[in-house]
Image (cartoon, helix red, strand yellow):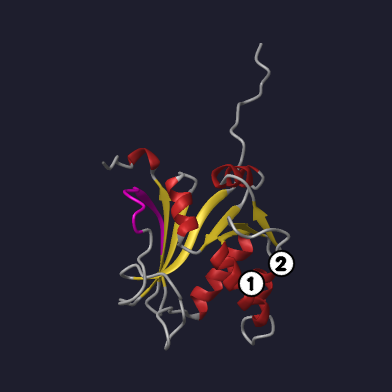
Amino acid sequence: MSSGRCGRLPVVGRLIISNAMTVNGAYEAPVPEPGGWLVMDPDSQQASLEMWQAADAMVMGRKTYEGLATVWPQMADLPGFEAYAHQMNSMPKYVASRTLSGPLTWNATLLEGDLADSVRALKSSHQGNLIVTGAGQLAHDLMTADLVDEVWLHVSPYLWPAGPRIFDDVGAVRLDLVATTAYSSGAVVLRYRLARSATPAVP
């Protein structure tokens, strides 16, 4: 006799790489206009805040952690950024690093041991979104280890001549478009899900 129970897969957190970039893929130092290429408007800034408010935690590498941990605490009283700064400063964070040692500041926890094992355990311990900020070595390693579920790109309407390009040397990865949101500033947010079964093998 059947027990009446249906076998269900456990609910685990989604690992999402979210990053700003230009149309031609530059992603480093996203400084707002006029000094840089990052284009923001009230609607896209609100959407970004809501993304972070809905997330379980932030995941980042050492360089991103050290940079953000210096900047965001100073923005807590900046007019117009109070809610954003509160969210960024208060939410849980996980840092992947081979050189840092705990305990960490800024409500952060060090991911120790093998990166893939640590991130799998992290996903198993969460049911919501785990947002990876930064598109450097950590994002590269997570992508090549097949640990990323989605990629969200905030594309500013710029061609930028300097800096590395996002996901260089990652290889061929097929993506399914989940959503597109265009803003009056010309910025576009593209949300993709990894289509693993359709990813071709590259020699």
Q: In the rendered structure, find residue 69 and report the number of the disc placed on it.
A: 1
Residue 37 in view: yes
Q: Is residue 45 left or right of residue 95?
A: left
Residue 84 in view: no
The disc labelled 1 sits on which kind of residue? Ala
Residue 76 x, y percent position in the rendering: 68, 80
Camera-side residue of 131 and 54: 131
In the rendered structure, does residue 9 fall within the stretch colored magenta?
A: no
Q: Secondary structure at mark 2?
A: loop
Q: Earlier in the sequence, mark 2 or mark 1?
A: 1
When the figure is inspected, residue 179 is found, relative to residue 13, above or below; the finding is below
When the figure is inspected, residue 53 is found, relative to residue 110, above or below; the finding is below
Q: Residue at x 57, y 73 (%)?
A: 67
Q: Residue at x 49, y 46 (%)?
A: 147
In the picture, the quarter occupied by the C terminus is top left
Residue 159's image quarter?
A: bottom left
Camera-side residue of 157 and 142: 142
Which residue is situated farthest in the top direction here? Answer: 1
**Would you name the residue on which mark 2 appears?**
105
Label 1: how many Cα within 10 Å (few below 14, some 14–19, many 20+): some
**What range of the chain is rendered magenta?**
168-180
